[in-house]
Image: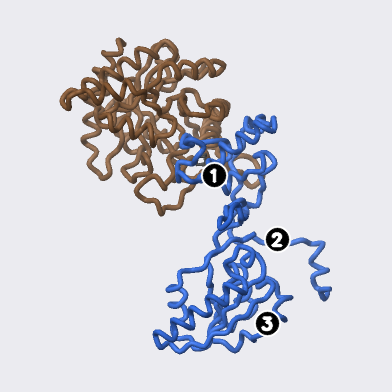
């Protein structure tokens, strides 16, 4: 096995159950708050912190800049990269740029369509998809880019990056086989770790994990913190492949307003505890409640 | 066929500001079939223009004509009204017809009466859907005849994204997820291996990536110089 390029990779290699967190850059230049939260609550409780890339197609500060700021604070980022906004020239260039800025983990995503965000009139790019982006990263690591020189040979790089490459999957999609086939392709194209869409149904997740037992990449189960019962219901109706069971919705609904956060922490902790035997880590998406991460980790018995 | 729809009437009237003699020119091909730019629609538009002109004192005279294809010079002999006698011609052809007529009759003011929307087919009464994007590099052989370039909102080529929801696309609940349809079709055909193959990044030069596309066929270029039969 080659030397790990990041702490996330070496922790997963060691077989340890790994927790990752997530921050979303702000809409505007006031990045202090998200950096402070990452430093105060995530730095010591997670192996790496995902930085979302213009999440849900709502324009904001970029993931490369914030990933770099995390590096400078000694926090390891997972640089999320979507193919919605940049063509192959920009994506490859950004990968090189991110590398020279100290970024080592990359998560390759297709990205929500511009229609979902706050600039629906924008031209969607999708020059590459998540599979061909992973192939492009693997190619850069081999010292080549996607272009050809005048003789028709691949262009050679003056110095190749090395990344720990991730991909995502939706384990509880209604039709799971097309998701699994695409996941196989992502791994074939170079994905080395998987972070999943939010899961609230441990039994369904275990079934999914059994179906992908032939795939060797470590899987970090995704959990989005629920803030209210209404949010859970909204996710059920509007977020593809997410199914919050009634029992969990009821617990959120029954909780008094001041207890909601506590209950949500318990739910997350229990979910991780119930699923940790069949996966290699958990990816906690706290949507601003970053200060809850240490308690979730504790509640999960990690 | 090429599917098109009538432009908003006010937009057409704004284009006609200052024109006194107008010819509304239908096209007998695709836009006749999709009920947007044939003889009948040309007559309807002409009546509306006459009415508005009377109401607002614009004083426009309007004639109506229709030829078999505005994108083919051969049919330019069939005009019943000579377009050269008009201040403006509102063409109810697709953009190809408007562009080709403008090229062939550079002295005329040819105005688009339609918005050309897509290459599609009639799928239900009053409904047309997009089937092809004209990408220049057809993939239908390995996608069960369902085009991911035209019918997946992200033109993905390696399979469904995470946005597929109950068979629908994340972009609009009334739009099918093309990749789910492709998956189901390939499964029915026993050809899921086609889905399993990694498809490399596309060469967008065959699409619009390297500018205006042109087809030239050596073997036909000589014949073309002879008079048509
Ligand atoms: S939901 Fe389906 S059709 Fe829509 S973008 Fe994703 S793969 Fe394409």
Please report the residue visible at 24 percent of the width from the left and 28 percent of the height from the top.
A289
Q: Specify the quadrant of the image occupied by residue A180.
A: top right
Q: Can residue B205 be seen in this view?
A: no
Beta carbon at label 1 within 8 Å of ligand 1: yes
Q: Distance between the residues labelled 3 and 2?
A: 28 Å
Which residue appears farthest toward the left when viewing the image?
A: A258
- Check residue B152 in the rendering and tell me which mark sits there, or answer none: 1
Mark 1 surroundings within 10 Å by alpha-carbon count, few (fewer than 14), some (14 through 19), many (20 or more) = many
Q: Specify the quadrant of the image occupied by residue A151.
A: top right
- Colour brown, chain: A
Q: Which chain carries label 3?
A: B
Name the residue that disc number 3 marks: B79
- Check residue B215 in the rendering and tell me which mark sits there, or answer none: 2
Which tint was used for chain B?
blue
In the rendered image, residue A225, in percent from the top left (x then y), is placed at 30, 26
In the rendered image, residue B71, in percent from the top left (x then y), is placed at 66, 70
Quadrant of the rendering where the N terminus of chain B is positioned = bottom right
Please report the residue visible at 61 percent of the width from the left and 55 percent of the height from the top.
B122
In the rendered image, residue B113, in percent from the top left (x then y), is placed at 53, 72
Q: Which of marks 3 and 2 is nearer the N terminus?
A: 3
Side of A99 relative to A287 (left or right): right
């Amino acid at each position: 096995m080659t030397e790990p390029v990041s702490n996330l990779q070496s922790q997963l290699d060691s077989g340890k159950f790994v927790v990752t967190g997530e921050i979303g850059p702000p809409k505007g230049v006031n990045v202090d708050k998200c950096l402070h939260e990452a430093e105060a609550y995530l730095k010591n409780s997670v192996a790496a912190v995902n930085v979302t890339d213009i999440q849900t197609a709502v324009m904001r500060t970029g993931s490369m800049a914030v990933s770099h700021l995390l590096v400078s604070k000694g926090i390891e980022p997972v640089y999320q990269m979507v193919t919605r906004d940049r063509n192959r020239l920009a994506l490859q260039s950004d990968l090189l740029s991110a590398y020279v800025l100290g970024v080592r983990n990359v998560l390759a995503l297709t990205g929500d369509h511009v229609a979902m965000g706050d600039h629906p009139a924008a031209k969607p790019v999708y020059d590459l998809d998540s599979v061909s982006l992973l192939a492009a990263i693997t190619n850069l690591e081999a010292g080549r880019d996607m272009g050809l020189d005048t003789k028709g040979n691949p262009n050679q790089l003056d110095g190749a990056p090395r990344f720990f490459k991730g991909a995502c999957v939706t384990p509880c999609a209604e039709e799971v086989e097309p998701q699994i086939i695409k996941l196989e392709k992502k791994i074939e194209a170079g994905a080395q770790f998987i972070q999943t869409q939010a899961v609230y149904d441990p039994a369904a997740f275990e079934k999914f994990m059994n179906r992908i037992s032939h795939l060797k990449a470590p899987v970090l189960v995704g959990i989005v913190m629920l803030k209210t019962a209404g949010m859970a219901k909204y996710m059920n109706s509007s977020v593809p492949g997410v199914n919050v069971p009634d029992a969990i919705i009821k617990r959120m609904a029954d909780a008094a307003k001041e207890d909601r956060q506590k209950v949500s922490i318990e739910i997350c902790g229990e979910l991780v505890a119930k699923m940790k035997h069949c996966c290699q880590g958990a990816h906690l998406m706290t949507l601003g409640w970053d200060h809850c991460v240490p308690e979730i980790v504790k509640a999960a018995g990690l | 066929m090429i599917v098109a729809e009538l432009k908003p009437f006010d937009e057409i009237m704004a284009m006609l500001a200052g024109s006194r003699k107008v010819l509304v020119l239908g096209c007998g091909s695709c836009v006749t079939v999709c009920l947007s730019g044939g003889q009948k629609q040309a007559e309807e538009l002409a009546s509306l223009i006459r009415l508005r002109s009377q109401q607002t004192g614009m004083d426009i005279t309007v004639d109506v004509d229709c030829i078999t294809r505005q994108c083919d010079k051969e049919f330019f002999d069939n005009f019943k009204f000579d377009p050269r006698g008009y201040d403006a011609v509102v063409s109810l052809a697709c953009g190809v017809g408007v562009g080709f007529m403008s090229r062939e009759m550079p002295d005329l003011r040819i105005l688009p009466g339609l918005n050309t929307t897509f290459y599609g087919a009639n799928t239900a009464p009053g409904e047309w859907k997009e089937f092809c994007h004209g990408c220049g590099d057809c993939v239908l052989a390995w996608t069960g005849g369902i085009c991911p370039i035209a019918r997946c909102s992200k033109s993905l080529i390696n399979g469904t994204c995470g946005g597929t929801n109950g068979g629908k696309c994340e972009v609009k609940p009334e739009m099918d997820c093309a990749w789910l349809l492709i998956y189901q079709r390939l499964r029915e055909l026993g050809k899921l291996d086609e889905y399993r193959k990694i498809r490399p990044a596309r060469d967008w030069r065959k699409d619009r990536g390297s500018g205006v596309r042109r087809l030239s066929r050596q073997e036909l270029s000589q014949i073309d110089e002879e008079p048509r039969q």
